[in-house]
Amino acid sequence: MVPLRVDLSLPLRSFDVELELDVGAETVALVGPSGAGKTSVLRAIAGLARPASGTIACGGDVWFDSAQRIDRRPDQRSIGYVFQEYALFPHLNVAQNVTFGGGRADRLLWRLRIEHLAEARPSELSGGERQRVALARALARNPRVLLLDEPMAALDPHTRGSVRAELHDLLRELALPALLVTHDFEDAAALADRVGVLVDGRLRQLGKPADLLGSPADPFVARLAGANVLSGVAAPASNGLTAVLLDAGPTVYAADEAAGRTEVVVYPWDVSLARAAPDDSALNHVKDEIVSITPLGNRARVRLRTLTAEITTASADRLGLAPGEPVVASFKATQARLLPRG
Amino acid sequence: MRAAFAALLAVACAVALAFLLLPVAAIFLRVPPGDLLGALGNDVTRDALLVSLKTSAIAHVSVLLVGTPAAYLLARRRFRGRGLVLTLVELPLVLPPAVAGIALFAAFGRAGLLGGQLDALGVQIPFTQAAVVLAVAFVESPFYFRGAIAAFETVDGSLLDAARTLGASPARVFARVALPLAAGGLGAASALALARGLGEFGATIIFAGSLQGVTQTLPLAIYAQFEQDFDTALAISALFIVVGAVLLVALKLYPWFRFASIFRSRFAPSTSS
């Protein structure tokens, strides 16, 4: 029996959410732009919003079934819900927040390493601490399903990495069906076993993070996963590859087969930069100009006119890159995936 | 030019302050404080004080008991005609109190809308203490209602949702989350409504009359004493000013009280599990 089965139709202001999703003892992330209906899905599962039709079942328990006119109240569904911005009760301290729904706080506070904060007010906590209190509160009643709405969004960039690693470990350890919603593909890929891309209420693609990266269903998914998506016209080339004349000017080669209007998908971390075209195995060398350089920890995002490359800051420093300067961007034909125009 | 404008602002401010404070100060300057206290001891004042306290207390508690859950509903639910309901509720705010008195007559008087039914039950309302209670409640309730709706609207809806997912029934969500978080605004609205109710005059004198010991509240006693014993009128007025000042200061100090309670719970010995 599937731990959580969702099949619902939920009318929103400008579109309907239509979603069919089974979640086993795993973490599934719904990722998509804001306004895609992600939070509405969580609210429907928790009983805070009523779908127009469909079923929501947890194990053998039916929480919602429009055909049988079953609609259990939120307090009658076994849900742990971590709200966006965490929604901690400001007038209660940490221990009172965690035990609001009953149960004991001490073991959970200890497990999440916040036992020293039991008497603190939410307003006195850091973002990471608030997230842990919200998790402890959501878990205090031993829920059968865990819902997380943008659990990373309220964190500052420098605590993000460590908080994400801890949340990942906690989710593995709980082995609960967990549905997580985020607009950040990187968070989704790092936290979830499977990732679903939700756009305008529809699931565009659902799969392991590596599958979404390796074979995105459409240009939108590729762009969401962080790829460069370059438009052009494809034609078979004499070397057995496909040549794509990019709208931006240069021609690039790809190992995939395609003809006519197409999109070339290249991940920034597959692009290397050099001062002059190197004599290497990469077939694609695009002469370009640096628009901006954004450091991301030990990596740097280098935006060029046609595409974006992600290299180590060490390399960027060694090359002495600066905006306005010419560079050559290189990537292999096997790293250029072709998608029909979407 | 700039200096002249600055001077104009300062003068306007001084005139406004003087205009507002001079009459208030005059009450205390006209009669020595000892005589004021003495005047509060006479029968008329004592009776009026008792009537005022009793009717205001009953009216205010009723307004709080009915108004708080009603305001919660209107603040949290979105339904067709909500705007109309909110506007209608505020209508008594802009009515002259005399109109409120006539309206109450038209509803609860002998020849009024419910007069027949009340008569059949043997109940007569006009010119009784019940009439005072009705008049006070009618006039003060919009003040409380309006403030209470605003207070509940400022409570973050996701906190109420969170409580729901933590197994709390709607009644528990109200008691444990909405009520404590709206407490500041509810307290302020309650104080304003109480002050308005204590000062109620026009609707009361029309609907309840001014019978000493029965329907004569403190404001009505001021009016009754105005021509007979001006010092007593002054003394009651002074009492009002003191009560009003205490209410105002309490309202201004409220954030500080809140802070103090957080401070206490933060450093108090642990009581949680």
Image (cartoon, rainbow, N blue to C red):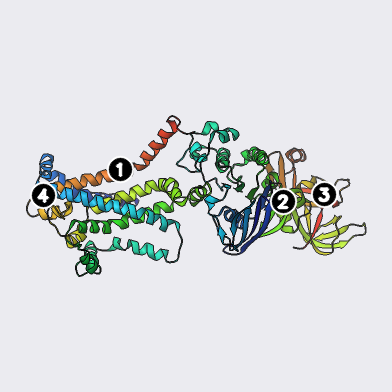
Disc 4: CA contacts within 10 A as few (<14), some (14-19) or many (>=20): many
Q: Position of residue A106 (x, y in %)?
A: 54, 33
Using the numbered discs, state the Cα–Cα distance from disc 3 to disc 4 in whole angstroms.
98 Å
Image position, residue A78 (x, y; %): 58, 48
Q: Judge if badges 2 and 4 mark residues of a common chain.
A: no
Q: Nearer the viewer, mark 3 or mark 2?
A: 2
Disc ID at residue A226: 2
| Residue on which the image places disc 1 | B250
Residue B44 image label? 4
Q: Is residue B194 above or below residue A10?
A: above
Viewed as shown, does residue A324 lie left or right of A38? right
Chain that bears disc 4: B
Q: Which residue is mark 3?
A: A331
Dot 4 amino acid type: Val
Q: What amino acid is at disc 1?
A: Ala
* Mark 3: few/some/many CA within 10 Å (<14, 14-19, 20+): many
How many discs appear? 4
Residue A309 at x, y percent in the picture: 75, 48
A178 or B22: which is nearer to us? A178
State the image quarter where residue B265 is shown.
Answer: top left
Seen at 78% across and 61% down, the residue is A247
- Give the image location of residue B53, x and y in percent: 21, 48
* Residue at screen point 17% across, 53% down: B217
